[in-house]
Amino acid sequence: EDQVTQSPEALRLQEGESSSLNCSYTVSGLRGLFWYRQDPGKGPEFLFTLYSAGEEKEKERLKATLTKKESFLHITAPKPEDSATYLCAVGRGSTLGRLYFGRGTQLTVWP
Amino acid sequence: NAGVMQNPRHLVRRRGQEARLRCSPMKGHSHVYWYRQLPEEGLKFMVYLQKENIIDESGMPKERFSAEFPKEGPSILRIQQVVRGDSAAYFCASSLRTDDTEAFFGQGTRLTVV
């Protein structure tokens, strides 16, 4: 059965304290791995898509990497505004829009 | 360019009533996906639609739930005879193509069944 597992479930960081979030997956026919950010009461906001092992993408303080079995979202020198739930999802087959989501990592960055 | 629009944002229904959730995709997008987010759970795929066609409804409960995306107007997710277990956030996403690199999500409709 296809599975996407994110860890840790919750993470508290002091402002400036870098860390990484993990997303491990067991999906056949992976077409893409997606990272989203979700703020309370809002819809998921797209961050990155990774397609193949070894690929890396960056956006401001965030950097996503992908291996054959997992992806990491590295947060460098986080700020309080980075506090959110970060969701990992995988797409497979011919329909990338059908995504399999993990439960997310709730990140809190305190000043 | 307006994003994916969902309405209402909040919906309260009594057990046994019908709930209708609407989703207008981004301009030019013809692929719509509905997801459900139960408390303390991840987003779960429900259904994938193109204009006038249901492409994949493998995530839809067998009974009481239906979806449509007519030629004109928004996509509708209908839940008949709602039960308390239907209380959740329902999200709609749209994409330009089926192999698009990202799907854009709306703000969701939070359904509460009392």
Image (spheres, helix red, strand yellow):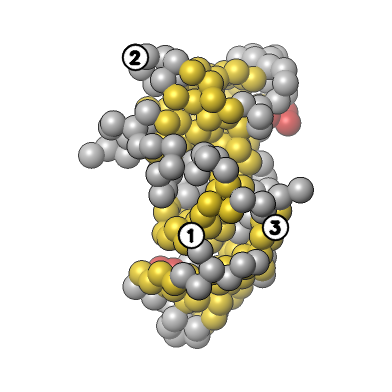
Mark 2 is on which residue type?
Glu
Mark 3 is on which residue type?
Thr
Task: Rate crowding at label 3 as few (under 14), some (14 to 19) or many (20 or more) other CA atoms within 10 Å.
Answer: some
Task: Rate crowding at label 1 as few (under 14), some (14 to 19) or many (20 or more) other CA atoms within 10 Å.
Answer: some
Q: Is residue A37 visible?
A: no
Identity of the residue furthest to the left in this view: B1
Q: Which residue occupies 43% across, 60% down?
A: A48
Quarter that holds the C terminus of chain B: top right
Mark 1 and mark 3 residues within 8 Å of each other at the beta carbon: no
Q: Which residue occupies 60% across, 38% down?
A: B45
The x and y percentages for residue A108 are 54, 70
Instruction: Indicate the secondary structure of the residue bearing disc 1.
Output: loop
Identify the mark at residue A51; answer none if there is no mark.
Answer: 1
Residue B99 falls in image quadrant: top left
**A97 relative to A75, above or below:** above
Residue with the mark numbered 2: B72
Cα–Cα gap, marks 2 and 3? 39 Å
Tell me: B58 left or right of A81: right
Cα–Cα gap, marks 1 and 2? 34 Å
The x and y percentages for residue B39 are 67, 45
Mark 2 and mark 3 residues within 8 Å of each other at the beta carbon: no
